[in-house]
Amino acid sequence: MALSFLTLTRGRGRFDLADWLTWAYLVLALLLMFGPVLWVAMSSFKTEAALQEYPPTFLPLAPQTATVEGYDEPLQLFRVTAGEHEGKVLAQIRRVGLMSQMVDPADPSQKFQVNINDRVPEREFALATENYSVLFERFNFGLYFWNSVFITVVATIITVLFNSMAAFALSKYKFRGRTLVFVLIVATLMIPPTVNLVPIYLVVSQIGLVNSPWGVIWPAVATPTGVFLLRQYMLTIPDDLLDAARMDHASEWKVYWRIVLPLSAPALAVLVIFSVMWRWNEFLWPLIVLNRSEQFTLQLALNSFQGDLQTSWAPLLAMTVLTLLPITLVFAVLQKYITTGIAQSGVK
Amino acid sequence: MLATVMTAPSWLVSAAFGLFERPMLALQKMTGAQRIAWVFLLPNLVIFSAFTFLPIALNGIYATTGSDRILLGERPFVGVENFASLLACDNYLQPNSCERDIFWRAVHNTGYFVVVQVGLMVLFSLLTALILNRNIPLRGFFRGVFFYPVLLSPVVVALIWKWILQRFGVLNAGLEGLGMPTVNWAHMGFYTLILLAGLQAIPADVYEAAEMDGASRWRVFSRITMPLLVPTMVVVVVLSLIRAVQAFDEIFVLTGGGPGSATLLLLQYIYETGFAFRPQLFGVAAAASMLMAAVLLVLTLIQLRAARSRAEG
């Protein structure tokens, strides 16, 4: 039985054990896949003190305080859980050993002694937005964000332009060496950049691109995946269309960008999504090329902050949320295109 | 929807492409309408040559030369010394007996990581794909649920799990064990998607015929679903193998390779030997890269074969 529920491809009208197991799995998966991200998002709005609290809460809660007549500072509120004042909400004046001196905010004249084990802090929902503002004030977040956006946008534009030009040449012209060039490009899919780190670094450093965003952009733009994807798509565009345009004296460049590019929009969209994802998330190559913190991308900044023991979790979590936000938004809007695009091309 | 997003700043795009109109026309008059293809190929080929073809050729030169200089002219030829030092070992099962013990520790860790990680990955993504292939409502939504972490950056993924672990007070105890579940969590959706496409390619009439014959569910699964899914499974296994051999980002951010070198993987060894540590042993890093490339090449050739048999079958 354990495995047999997997074999069904269609439900049969009744809700049997197989369906129960399926839904249990899906609900568990929902919690496991979204839960951690959601919890980090919630935690990013907690104060540093609330982040240390045990057991952890899901919602960002902050201790509630009240201004009581006769006291300059706001006092923290507690709910008394045992003893003669059980059920009351009192404000704490000070703590003396195991006893807490408390006062009723409504009637400040009377003071009570309450055992600290007999009271729990009153908490309210409060967003510690300072975790986010501090990123801009102290952590240079704007700069890292800009570096990441610059690399992602520029690299994606160049990738789409260069790859589509190459794909156009490889799919719409007959010339000597065409097959050789295509095979050479596709063959490099077998040799990922990770095995050529040292010589790529030599080239980048010789052009003087170490510690420059262009040192991340240029090595990444001539993707074999993109050329392959676009070429396969452009092969399906009928040549008659191109010839008709040429009859009307359109230049080859015009044929490329007025006819072939617009007709390749679905494949271009897939490449745009891939490229944005690749460049925004890239880690190892920027880590090698960008050594000065003012050039860091968000990923590098996150990594260097988490390694720094001086950094507290509150701003780090806020930064994590801001880093995953753009990709999450893209995903929410384009989910269908992304999943079908990847399922069809088998790359990521 | 997507088309609107992409064509929204169309006047800008038109203006940008229009700029090239005249120079390209002039070029076309020089080359003729056929050889203009090379002009279209050129930008991509230049970048490709500089950052892919040339490095592939240079890697071997680095691997056979020594010293910590990056310029090739300043590097003395040392023959197979870099490879020899990496492979010098009394007993390959005991990294301590090797000249470059950290390299062998990394090889061991990577081997262990690859085997366990790929096993878990295939198991869970197969289970998930089978479940998503059932006739459930909201299938598209659930497919998205599993796929969402695939898009997140490895650094973010690592930080999310590091935070959860530290929050429940098991940071020091559990960090080493966390690497694999984290990688699985992040990438499972990708393989699920491929397997789901494979499952949906199985024609429905095969199932209908089995149902008419009164075949049990287990029999349908073992005699129809699995055999027809094998080519897709091979693709998934090899793809996840290729990725696992090059694993770096998540583990590096989570553990930094520690404690000690308990979670140090091959790519981190290459990164540290060639770039992070001084002196920068480019030759050793390149030699280690080439050993890794050899493994990847074999795996990719298997994948190509599998992909071909999938396309034919």
Image (spheres, coloured by chain):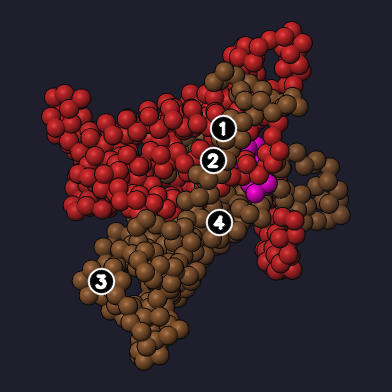
Chain colours: A brown, B red
> Mark 1 to mark 4: distance in Å?
23 Å
**Helix, strand or loop at mark 3:** strand
Q: Which residue is mark 2?
A: A29
Q: Residue at left 82%, top 51%?
A: A246
Mark 1–mark 4 CB contact (< 8 Å): no
Q: Nearer the viewer, mark 1 or mark 3?
A: 3
Quick one: label 4, few (<14), some, or many (20+) residues within 10 Å? some
Q: Nearer the viewer, mark 1 or mark 2?
A: 2
Which amino acid is tagged 2?
A: Ala
Mark 4–mark 2 CB contact (< 8 Å): no
Q: Which residue is mark 3?
A: A99
Give the residues in magenta: A335-345
In this view, the residue in front, B19 or A259, is A259
Quick one: label 2, few (<14), some, or many (20+) residues within 10 Å? some
Residue A229: image location, x then y, percent: 63, 41
Residue B100: image location, x then y, percent: 17, 36
> Mark 4 to mark 3: distance in Å?
51 Å
Q: Residue at left 75%, top 38%?
A: A236
Looking at the image, residue A305 lies above or below residue B35: below
In this view, the residue in front, B63 or B12, is B12
Mark 1–mark 2 CB contact (< 8 Å): yes
Residue B82: image location, x then y, percent: 21, 36
Looking at the image, residue B98 lies above or below residue A269: above
Q: Which residue is mark 1?
A: B128
Instruction: Determine which quarter of the picture holds residue B117.
Output: top left
Q: Closer to the N terminus: mark 4 or mark 3?
A: 3
Q: Which residue is mark 4?
A: A327
> Mark 1 to mark 2: distance in Å?
9 Å
